[in-house]
Image (cartoon, coloured by chain):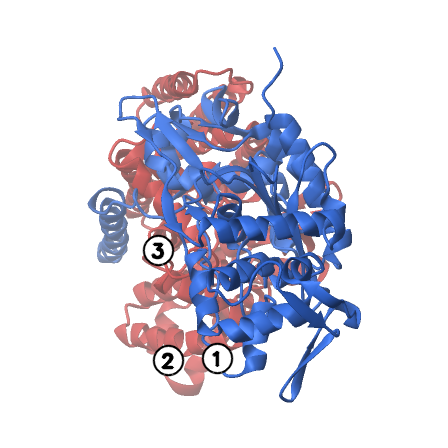
Chain colours: A red, B blue
Amino acid sequence: MRRWVVPWLELAGWLGLAVLVLSRRQYVSLWWQLCAIWAGLAGLAVLSHCCGFSHVLLLPAALLVSLGWIFLHRLRPEWAAQQFVGFLVGAATYCVGLFGGWASTRTKYIFGLGAAVLLALTWVFGVAVGGAKAWLAVGPLRFQPVEFARVLLVLFIVRYLSDNQALLRQKRGLEAAAYWGPLLLLVGSVFLLLAVQRDLGPALLVFAVYCVLSVAVLSSWKLAALYVLLAVVGFGAVQHIFPHLGTRLTAWLNPWQYAETAGYQIVQGLFALNSGRVLGKGIGAGSGELIPEVHTDFIFALIGEELGLAGAVAVVSLYLILAFAGLRLAAGSTEPVEQYTAVGIVLLWFMQVFLVVGGILRLVPLTGMTLPFLSYGSSSLAAQMWMLGILSSVGRVRSK
Amino acid sequence: MKPLLRKIFLLILGMYFLMVAALVFWQVAVDLGKHPLNPRRYGAFRQPRGAILDRSGLPLARTLMAGEKYVREYADPSVTHVTGYFHQRYGITGLEKAFDARLQAGQDVYTTIDLRLQQKVAELMGDRVGAAVVMEPETGAVLALVSCPQIDGNSLDDFWSDYLADQRSPFVNRAVQGLYPPGSALKPLVLAAALAGGITTADAHWTDRGVLKLGEEAISNHQGQAWGVITTSEALAHSSNVVFAQLAVELGPALLDALRRFGLGEAVLFPLSQSSGRLPSAAQSAYGWAQIGIGQGGLLATPLQMAAAISAIANGGKLMRPYLVQEIKGGWRLRQAQRPEFVRQAVPQWAAADVRDAMVLAVEKGTARAAAVRGTVVAGKTGTAQTGSGGDHSWFVGFAPAEKPELAVVVVLEHGGLASQTAAPLGGQILREALQLLAPQDM
């Protein structure tokens, strides 16, 4: 894009630092990390630009990452330091996404199977950290495979749909089953693997992205109706299998009644948001520590309290800008698979935002996921940066 | 391909506007600031809050600066059941809650508590479960109000889950909410009622054979002890169930009226949330009346109620309303003072004096001997109340000096066993310490 974007990135970074220092009036021990994040992102922007890729996505992403870092530092400086490590890994995964390309017609099954295998490995060899057995340890490395698995799966889905688009549309009966088979098998197994690990947030997200993608690509309303039916039936079934889903549901429908038990988190989140009013209390002036899991699932409630409606809408708008820029890149490409990939990633981002923010705002039940780029979590941030890299590479065709 | 992207963008835009609308709703349209569960309601952590002080101005609870925030600090764990606590996560209780508006306005609450006495009583209670109340009989001012186990208002964060898990329910303020059958500790009130009702006199003679048959049932003394020919005063001193059962049977419904006049079964205006106790309905049989007469039969009272009632005996039959807060002042709002409040003449003065003499006898040669204090005359009465489950509760009620009472003391020990060996010595110790602490200092 424009050359002047890069210095602006730098400037915004210093501004963010100033906001932090002024609003807390205390020594920011890790201030150099924020500068490093901005320098790193500016470097990535230059790299992308020089190699003929788009760098527009880096600006909103940089704002989100640094905002997340600032709030993590405000909560507990160690979390910000850990997030910085996540960002460093993310810079590498961004390059992987940028240069590594996406699933080809031949390699797509590796991606799809990779997702399923990663989750199966987690299921078998998973390490429990803080209750959930969602971690995989390889030597000194420890990460949450689910963050990467869903990207792999979406890359598989979009390639499969674009490869078999015509056939999936035309074939009927048994023949159609042969073409739907591999897709449903892999999506279904990933969904089930997530469900048995009680990771229902990502399961729901993967299912939703798959539904929207297949309906959009095959432009079939019949399919949409089928998915809705499936969702309703599946929901009823899942509720019988997982009783804890019932508590989440009652907490969603009537949090005030269970304000001190199941609905505690939601209610505390709403109190936080509500106390922010229009302009917020200022960074560090809120009482975000009162919300359980404020650094991961509920960081948005804290932002709403301390930056107010203005800040909360700004954050959601940043995601909208990110989605819009991603779709603009897709529109510039002539390759259907590039477009589907862009759409898949944009959906993965924005639907996750909707599930998380909507969960806090009581639009949907709480699902327990991170907010892309903002929440605490190195794996999450690395996976988001990977997606950012992939999406940025969609612009290559146009730039050349 | 463009229509596909447009559809996707419209979908995303739809989600976006849903979120923005919900944000506007939750952040601007509604106001949850006054919601009772909202911890931000106690936003007062960013402003100074008035102190809660003892009778001599020592702080029981005060607000200190800690960095940018204010922290509420309590003098001692022993005061937390009086002051309550004021905590961002765990909310607000006790006096902190009762006078929240005043405290938030920066006013100070002066209580009638004597901090040194409060600490001393808590120390004497040790790790026993129960409550103790020290009252000024003439005014009804509460000098000490201790409930054990205590909670520590300064370290709720550290011990909250321990408190929740504790089988002994440390959150219950036993001094005002604990409901206990008074057992023989009720006998001074029964005696006062009987004397006032003209049923007997202090030196009337009774023959006590240790057991009293009442139809199918029987009332017996502790360990079946027969006291032979004794006066009514001696019957109180030795805690004769046989004599008091007969008094109660003769009194009948008049007994319940008398107890009501002593304030049992009713909650008075008091800044801490309290239970009103329980007066049973009229008994259906002589045995039923006899049970009430010895403090059983479904009768329940709080330590504070017993303290007020025994203070009435000490105070010539005049029942005073117990009070805990004497003055609220400071800040911009009006000063408010609480004067001692006379409720009613529970029994005539001569009847109260006769009961007092009988209680002095109980400490001199009866069941409450362990409560004697060197250098003063103590009037007292023990009570060992059957509980239906677990060991007996032990009571001591008393006051000193008997001629011109300065202090009334009530002690309850849950499942404490025989009161003459547990509650009575503790009551005596409290009286001794309290008299020492409150004696006018020599210049």
- Look at 51% across and 68% down and name the residue there: B199
Identify the image quadrant of residue B4: bottom left
Which mark, by number, is residue A152?
none
Which mark, by number, is residue A336?
3
Circle 2: residue type: Lys
Depth check, front residue: A16 or A35: A16
Depth check, front residue: A63 or A386: A63
Mark 1–mark 3 Cα distance, whole angstroms, equals: 23 Å
From the image, tell me which residue sits under label 1: A178
As displayed, is residue A332 above or below residue B207? above
Residue A252 left/right relative to A26: left
The secondary element bearing badge 3 is classed as: helix
Residue B421 left/right relative to A131: right
From the image, tell me which residue sits under label 2: A171
Say which label, 1 or 3, has the lower sequence index: 1
Q: Residue B134 at what x, y percent from top left?
A: 57, 40
